[in-house]
Each structure stands twice: as C-alpha cells, then as structure tokens.
Image (spheres, rainbow, N blue to C red):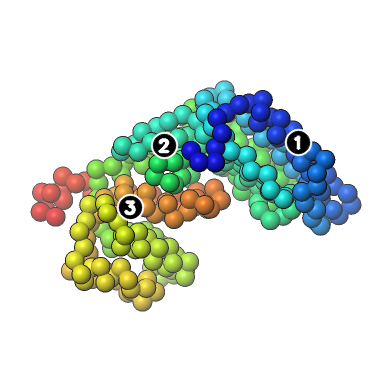
Amino acid sequence: MRGFKSYDKQELFNMINNISIERHGDQIVTKYGTRVLKTATVSNRYEIFDIAKYLKDKIEVIEKNFEIQKYSLTIKGGIQYLQLISDKVEIGGVDFYKSFYILNSSDKSRRLSFNVGLKSSSANFYTVGAHNASLVKKHLKGVTQAAEEASVGFDGESFNEQVENIKSLVGHQISFSKMREVILGDLDDTTKVNHRKFDAFKNTIRYARSGGFNLNSDQMNLMYKYSENLDSVPTNLDFYMDAFWAFQMYMRLFNKQDSHIVKNETARIMNMTKWAVRNAVLEQLGI
C-alpha cells in the first residue's frame, strides 16, 4: 500500500514518543522531539489530549485481537494521524483490510476522531461501519474521558456487521433512479452538497468500463445534466447497474476525506441495500 510501512511496533512507538503537546497560558505548543511544529492560541475550555499515550494504549488493545500488518503515521504542524492495517477479508473478489484511524489536532484545525473500517488499496477506497467503535469530538473539557469510552470493547467481531452488509451487495443490481434517491437523501430537502455528490457519481458512470450497463446516447446525455436541474429520472432512460460496483465507485469519491466523513457516507450508500435486486430476479424479468 502506498504511503504505508511494514509494522514495526518499536519503530512506531519511538516516533510516537517524540510527540509532545504543552500548554503555556493560552498557548498550545506542539513539538516533535525538541522541534516546535505548531503554536496555537486556545480558550480556557480547551483540554489538552495526550495523543501519544492514547495511540500507544490503543495499539496495545488492537494487537490483542488483530494482526497489525502496516501503519502510516502523519505528523504535520498540529496534526497527528495514525492509520493501522490488519487482517484481510475478501468480498466479491476485492481484498479489504480491517483498518483503524486515529486523528488528533493540537491546533484546533481538526476534531479528535477514532474510527475503524475496511480499506481496499486495490480499489482505492475505504469504508467505516455505522455501528463500529467511533468518536468525533472537539478538544474541549471531557474529550479525554469521551475518547476512552468510545474505543472500549471493540474486538474480533467489530467488523462482522460491516462485512456482511457489503457482502449483501454482491450479485445484486440497483437502478440508476434508486441510486439517485440514496445519494440525494430526502428529495424534498436535498442540499447542494448532495447534488454535487450525485454529479460526481454520474461522472464515474460516464467514464466507467464496468458496472454491468451499456448506455445509449440519450442515457449518456442524462449523465451530463446537472443534478439540480434533474427533477427525476425518466422511466425510459432508467437502467440497472451492479450494486457492488456502484458502492465502490461512490466510496472512491471520499478516499481522501477524514474517517468520520467516510463513516457518514458509508451509512448513506448502504441504504442501497433496500433497493438492490438479485441478478436472477432481473434475468427472469428480462432486464
């Protein structure tokens, strides 16, 4: 995996031990070793979070239930971001890896977050299950206690529900019109952001060489129409696509986003399970 190193616990701990966050009056100073990385002004409500201790504690817990294979630790300015890759799970011919994401910022630029999910390096996306252990919290009073409570109790079964949900998409199809409903959400109160997400998804269809569909010229023209100008999908232009493919293409749109955003979008797109139809059923209907 690009950007990841083979797991070496001592090497990783040595890097983590160099992280220090100190408070001097209303100033938070982030250091790596003796080098100052960032200085930020905070209010008296700000609570310093001991990210070095937290990272090491969570690594110890994760090692009890999972075989950590790779890691990526980013320390830049006031941001500290650790990603851990562990056991492999194969779904629909795609390799996923059980993964852990811990993000902290000592400069107020990002919220503290802890999430676990599945990462696919070959398909270039990752997901975070709705019911997996998670946390997203501002660095205010109580953040340390909240972080400890949020990451207690995850074990080897923490990924089971997410794995089964994704497996349920394999061998199914979903119509373009239903994908639109899933991505836009409440059609009576759709945000501009969701319209942009749907436009981005349509772009993946335009350039797709797989997905189980072959668009005619009228359907292709529909892909160029802005979502905000599209009241509905005409019945004669609707079509079916592979549900597992559609899931992967949508999640690729967020492969560089923070894990709490990925969690929200995973929950959104998994609503497609309500509308997915078995291939065999469509074949019987001649579709």
**166 horizontally vs 101: left or right:** left
**Residue that appears at 30% across and 38% down:** 92
Residue 180 in view: no
Q: Which residue is most to the top?
A: 64
**13 horizontally vs 217: left or right:** right
**155 horizontally vs 27: left or right:** left
Judging depth in this view, the residue of 44 and 253 nearest the camera is 253
Give the x, y percent position of residue 245: 31, 49
**Residue that appears at 76% across and 41% down:** 32
Label 3 SS: helix
Q: Given the image, on which type of amino acid does mark 2 rest?
A: Phe
Pick whichever of labels 1 and 3 is earlier in the sequence. Answer: 1
**Residue that appears at 33% across and 52% down:** 246
Pick whichever of labels 1 and 2 is earlier in the sequence. Answer: 1
Residue 168 in view: yes
**Residue that appears at 57% across and 25% down:** 63
Pointer 1 with pointer 3, Cβ within 8 A:
no
Mark 2–mark 3 Cα distance, whole angstroms, equals 16 Å
Q: Identify the image quadrant of the C terminus.
A: bottom left
Residue 170 position by quadrant: top left
Give the x, y percent position of residue 219: 23, 68
Residue bearing mark 2: 96
Q: Residue 246 carries which label?
A: 3
Residue bearing mark 1: 18
Mark 1–mark 3 Cα distance, whole angstroms, equals 43 Å
Q: Given the image, on which type of amino acid does mark 3 rest?
A: Ala
Q: Given the image, on which type of amino acid does mark 1 rest?
A: Asn
- From the viewer's perspective, is residue 165 above or below residue 188? above
Give the x, y percent position of residue 208: 30, 56
